Image (cartoon, rainbow, N blue to C red):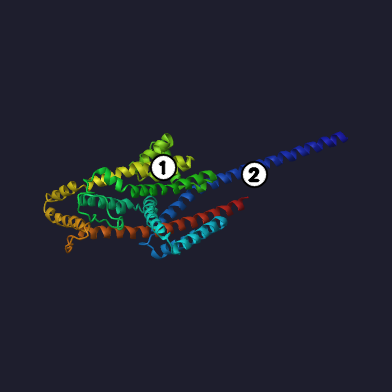
Amino acid sequence: CPRSVDKTFHNSRALQLETKTGFNMKQSTVNSENYSQNNTSAIPSAKLENRKLAKELKSLVLWKSPMKTMKYASLELLFLAKSNVERLLKHRAVVAVLLCASIALLALILTPGQHQQIIKLFKSKGFFMIYWLGLGILSSVGLGTGLHTFLLYLGPHIASVTLAAYECSSLNFPEPPYPNEILCPESTSSYGQINPSLWSIMAKVRLEAFLWGAGTALGELPPYFMAKAARLSGNSKEEHENIQELEKLQKRKKKGEKLTFFDKGKLFMEDIVERVGFFGILLCASIPNPLFDLAGITCGHFLVPFWKFFGATLIGKAIIKMHIQKIFVIISFNENLVEKFIKFLAFIPIIGVRLQIPFKVFFENQKQRLHRNTQKSAVSGNGNLLSTIFESFVFIMVCYFIVSIVNTLAQNCCKRTRKQLHQNGSDTETQKST
């Protein structure tokens, strides 16, 4: 009798376990089906959200919605200021040391004495270096504007030195006012006069050209560090947008879809950097390349060592590329070529002779400005036309640069807030499902 009771107990227990496991299996299948349905439904909703965000970002510019853009840009500035202050507070010791050093340096500058001559020299040279480095960084970073300070500042400076070298037959320009203003030496003796060559003019502008090129190399570091930090963090949500874009292009290429020339250039940049390494980075940095940002992103994503990336970029941009650009500008503004160019303008039908006048007067005025004692003729409206056009062009570019900074700040704020809202919504959904 006890054996029969135990047997019936074991049978009932087994039946309960079977029903329980069956129920759990059904529940798990239901959960998996629900999860898959949620995932499949989440994909189109994510695409819809991305489209909405892209549409909103396109409209978030000063000429379409000025008040909203200014509001978002102000919020982004406050966010950046707050985050930077928080970072500084984490390194209080370093901030304290830098603050003490700054106070000591300021006291040294303000205290009168014989050391003021050395400080004056350091001031002029330091400002010179910071100026050209900063212009190089601005040209490379650009903040989405494509602002190329070579065309606006370094190129005209090299052209002015070239024209002055041929006019003065010398490169010993008095300092000061050089490099802020170029004047011929006052001495009229044949001593010191030279027949300027390509190499002598290149040597005269070598330092500022190298500093500008080094600045452009420094400007390529933020994309590299961002991609590297995103890769090391292991969080796919923090991956750079351009990495995701490259992955999409690779998938399209594998499927055999037709790619534009620009998209092919992006994939070529990634391939050459990934396969060739140092010399691939050097090659990409040595030529005018609007896609070089992708080289920094690719190197950061594939954890290329810092000095391998920065060394190749510095050599390519500050040495090889700068020498190519210097040679091009110096040859273009050779005195003989300038005269031939002005003569060539006369062959243009109808407007050729009229075009010659402002160019002739412009170059004549440039030559007159190089001599201290020469009486400068009254500059006519035609003579001042080219300089007015160039100054207006620089002013428009700077205004466009400022406007684009405001637009970029506003769009970054919009992206950040939308991502936070989306992340908070997904977190609440996961909590409800659990």
The image shows residue 303 at horizontal and vertical percentages of 49, 40
Is residue 263 in view from this perspective? no
Q: Which amino acid does the dot numbered 1 rest on?
A: Ala
Residue farthest to the right? 1
Q: Quadrant of residue 1?
A: top right
Mark 1 lies on a secondary structure that is: helix
Mark 2 lies on a secondary structure that is: helix
At x 67%, y 42%, the residue is 24
Q: Quadrant of residue 403?
A: bottom left
Mark 1, residue position? 295
Label 1 packing within 10 angstroms: few (<14), some (14-19), many (20+): many
- Going from the N terminus, do you reach mark 2 or mark 1 first? 2
In the picture, measured across the screen, residue 353 lies left or right of residue 245, that is left
At x 47%, y 61%, the residue is 108
In the picture, measured across the screen, residue 171 lies left or right of residue 140, that is left
Q: How many marks?
A: 2
Q: Which amino acid does the dot numbered 2 rest on?
A: Gln
| Residue 73 vertical placement versus 202 (above, below) | below
**Which one is in front, 233 or 316?**
316
**Which one is in front, 118 or 310?**
118
